[in-house]
Amino acid sequence: MAEIAIVGAGFIGLASAAWLMRDGHRVTLFDPSGVGQGASFGNAGTFAHYACIPVNNPSVFRDLPRFLLSSESPFRLRWRYLPHLAPWLVRFLMSSTPHRYEASARALAALLGHAQAGYGPLLAGPELQQFVRPRECLYLYSNGASFDAARRALDLRQKLGVSFDVLAADDIRQLEPALAPIFERGVLFSDSWHFSNPQGFLQTLFEHLAAGGLTLKRSTVSAVQPAADGASLVVEGGTQRRFDYVVIATGARSATFAQQCGDRVPLDTERGYHVRYPGATQLISRPVGWAERGFYMTPMSDGIRVAGTVELGGFSDTRNRSLLDLLTFSSKRALPGLDSPDSSWLGFRPTLPDGLPVLGRSRASERVIYAFGHQHLGLTLAGVTGQIVADLVARRAPPLDLAPYAAARF
Ligand SMILES: Cc1cc2nc3c(=O)[nH]c(=O)nc-3n(C[C@H](O)[C@H](O)[C@H](O)COP(=O)(O)OP(=O)(O)OC[C@H]3O[C@@H](n4cnc5c(N)ncnc54)[C@H](O)[C@@H]3O)c2cc1C
């Protein structure tokens, strides 16, 4: 049995704790904000095992100018952040060539292929399973030309083992009659599901694990000091604590820790937003995505959450009013029965330029394990990530080859 610290209590930290405790280890979580308060709090809640097409794909060369100029674009760049972002952006564009995009898609599909099995220990008990809504995700196109442009990506998904049905306008209306009749084509992804309350799920998972000995320290970790036989955490205020293993699961804030452990990773953030419509949950029965507008509308336990958009702009807390307006305006156009949102949220997706997470041991110590950079898929990939973390600690063979996810790829 080892003493293990996990820094970060989001989907990745909690899932790692669940898998490590299954092996009998003693686990301490460190997070100043408590459980599930980072990107894990306000996401769209979808288990998107079909989402193997990374954001870095060849269509960005065609779409980027339009994305940057259109007021209806779900993609924004804060120009003041550009000097800081430039190295990341160059790598992102280099990762968007057909060859490198396909390599990322393959590596994502390989991970996603284990995503459902990875959730096993996280859904151990009815109090956890009650958050799972087994309703397949529906992804819609309001414009036939956008659907045609997405055909190649759909073909690649199919080649990589994703199964789905393509729907016409009438099929869409039959599935979700409250939607406005503006959608020409749709895709229904088999075997996907969603959480009715992602943070509620994480809190319940935490309580379940705490009953078995998991502890949470509400402290900020300021440094990780790797060593051959373990690692020390320096906690804000200067206290040091030594552990046999340390897991870095701090999402978008992980680059500094990686650097302290000998790895330079070009991690940045894709800012994303949600607005919430209280009540209204009966309007749709499943997560409904609108491709051209870059968001999902998900029926949650407390209302419909409209979540998505991508803003490259760093960690400023200032919200982009025009993206929140776009979410509100577009969701009401898709679902005319919606009234007014009562709250909004901004979160920071952790994103590497090639769209793949960093999973594996650090350069400076094999006792420091990286588990971050899950971009749009941290909820979906949480279980398999936890499984990999536990396998690395136990020196068991992980469920797949980890080479594509190594920090050393940069
Ligand atoms: C709008 C939006 C929609 C999304 N929709 C989906 C979806 O439908 N499906 C899906 O799979 N994914 C989705 N995602 C992505 C998903 O939310 C993220 O990939 C995931 O939450 C990342 O989890 P994490 O645990 O790595 O990071 P986080 O949840 O951000 O957790 C990191 C934690 O580390 C803590 N931390 C940071 N620094 C320190 C420190 N120095 N010391 C201690 N603790 C620290 C933070 O407080 C935070 O709690 C979405 C994201 C957004 C923004």
Image (cartoon, grey):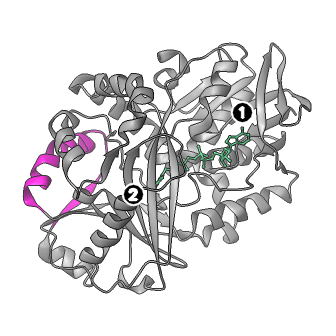
Could you tell me what secondary structure mostly forms the magenta stretch?
Answer: helix
Does residue 356 appear in this view? yes
Residue 254 relative to residue 81: left or right: right
Left or right of 398 on screen, residue 74? left
Queried whether the magenta region covers residue 299, the answer comes back as no
The residues tagged by marks 1 and 2 sit, at their Cα atoms, a distance apart of 28 Å
| Image quadrant assignment for residue 138 | bottom left
Query: Would the CB of label 1 be found within 8 Å of ligand 1?
Result: no
Q: Amino acid at mark 1?
A: Val
Identify which residue is drawn at 16% across, 42% down: 152
Image: 178 above or below 398: below
Q: Could you say where residue 390 lies in the image, as x and y percent from the top left?
A: 70, 35
* Residue 321 - label: none
Would the CB of label 2 be found within 8 Å of ligand 1? yes
| Rendered location of residue 206, percent (x, y) | 75, 58
SS class, disc 1: strand
Q: Nearer the viewer, residue 341 or 303?
A: 341
**Left or right for 370, reference 315:** right
Please, what secondary structure does the residue beneath circle 2 have?
strand
Give the residue drawn at x 83%, y 29%. 233
Circle 2 residues within 10 Å: few <14, some 14–19, many ≥20? many
| Residue 154 is inside the magenta segment | yes
Q: Residue 247: which disc?
A: 1
Q: Which residue in the protein does label 2 denote?
A: 308
Q: Residue furthest front?
A: 80
* Magenta range: 143-167
